[in-house]
Image (tube, rainbow, N blue to C red):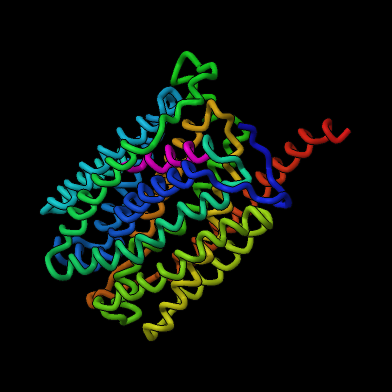
Amino acid sequence: MTDTVSSGKPAAPSFSGYQKLVVAMLALLQFSIILDFMIMAPLGAIIMPALAISPKQFGLVVSAYAFAAGIAGLVTAGFADRFDRKKLLLFFYVGFLLGTLWCGMAQTFESLLAARIVTGLFGGVIGSVVMAIVTDLFPITMRGRVMGMIQTAFAASQVLGLPAALFLSNHWSWHMPFLGMAAFGLLVGLFVLAKMQAVDGHLSAPQEHSPFMHLFHTLTNPRHIAAFVAIGFLTTGGFMLMPFSSAYTVNNLEISLANLPTIYLVTGICTIFIGPMIGKASDAFGKFGVYLFGTTLSIIMVLIYTHLSPVSLAVLIVVNTVMFIGIFSRMIPFQALSSPIPAPTHRGSFNAISSAVQQLSGGIASVVAGHIVTATDSGKLEHMDMIGYVVVTMSLLASFLVWNINSRLNREAAEKTAPQAA
C-alpha cells in the first residue's frame, strides 16, 4: 500500500465491511485503554483522601503508568515489526487487563503505584500497535476518518465510562471501576481474538537481522526525529492538566463532586459527534489546516480554564467542551498527517517509540505539574495558571515542528508525482 499526502480533493473512498469491523474493534480497545488512564483524574478527588496521599504522590501514581509505558515502548520497538500485529496486540492487552485487575485490588499507595507500573508496561504499547494496524490496513485518504472514529473512544469513555466509574466509586468504593474495566476488557479481547484477521503483510518484506539495530535505525532516522519531538510537546498539555482536573473543579471552581459525572457526560456527548467530523474535515480540507485550528482553539481555552474563578456548572461545561474540541482538532489530524512518515517495515517500531516518547514526556509533565501545583489546607490548588502557560508554550513549539513535517511530506509527494505529470 503506497503512502502519499492527500490534498483531500478526490472523492473519499468508502469503507469495506471488514474495515468497518476493524475500526469498531480498535475503537473498543482504545476505549478501555483511554478509560483506564482517564479514570485516574476524576477519581483523584476520591483516591487522595482515601489513601491519605498528597498531590505530589498522586502525580507520581499517574506518572508511574507513563514512565512504565515509555520504557515498554522502547524495549518493544526493536521487535515490534517481527510479529503478526494481532498477536502482539493481544499479548499486551492480556497484561494490561491483569494490571487493571491489580489496581482494583490495591489497598495502599505502594500497591496502587506498583499496579499502575504493571498496567503501564503493557497498556502503554497497545496504542502504538493500533496505529500500526491502522496504517497497514487503511490508505492515507481514509486515515483522518479512521482516527476520528477511533478517537471517539475518548469521548465515549467520558459519556459511558467516567459517569459509570464515578457512580460505582460513590456507591461502593474507588476499587469497583477498575474491576469493572477488567471484566469489560476481557470481553473486548475475546471479540478481537475471534474476529480480527492476521495483520502480517509487513513480514513479507526483508527484516533487519538485529532488533537492536532496527531500534537504532528507527530512533536516528531524520524523518522520525522531528515527529518524536512534536509528539513529546503535544503530550505535555494533557498530562499536566488532567491529573488535577477533578480536584481543581471541586476545590477551586466549587463544583460539587456529585456534579462531576454531568460534566464528563455532556462533554463526552458533544465530542462523540465532533470526533468523526474532525476526521472527515481533515481528509476533505487538509490535515495541517485543521491541526492549526485545533491548536489555536485549545490555546485560548487552556488559558481561560486555568484562570477560572468559581463558576456555575453550565459555564464550566461550555469551557470544558470547547477545550476538548480544540484538543481533538489537533490530535486527530496530527496522527493522520504523521502516519506516512515511517516505511512499512518500520511502522511498528516507529509507533512504539512514538508511544514511548508520548508516555515518558507525559510522565515528566505529570511530575513537573505535581511540583508546580500545591494544595492549601482547604484543598484548593494553587499555581494552575502556571500550568496553563507551560501548556501554551509547548503547543506553540509543537506547531512549528508540525509545520516542518507537513512541508517536507508535501514536497516528497510533489516529487513523486512530478515525473508522472511530465
Whole-percent x and y of residue 216?
Answer: 50, 25
Q: Magenta stretch: residue 196 in it? A: no
Q: Choose between 327 and 177: the one closer to the eye.
A: 177
Q: Main secondary structure of the magenta part?
A: helix
**Magenta span includes 127:** yes
- Residue at x-position 54% and y-position 44%: 229
Relative height, residue 126 to residue 254 (above, below): above
Residue appearing at x 52%, y 54% in the figure: 331
Is residue 97 something that shows in the picture? yes
The segment highlighted magenta reads 123-134
Which quadrant of the figure has residue 248?
Answer: bottom left
Quadrant of residue 154 in the image? bottom left
Where 30 sits versus 203, above or below?
A: below
Instruction: Count the numbered circles shown.
Output: 0
- In the displayed structure, does residue 333 sit left or right of residue 250? right
Residue at coordinates 29% horizontally, 41% vertically from top-left? 189
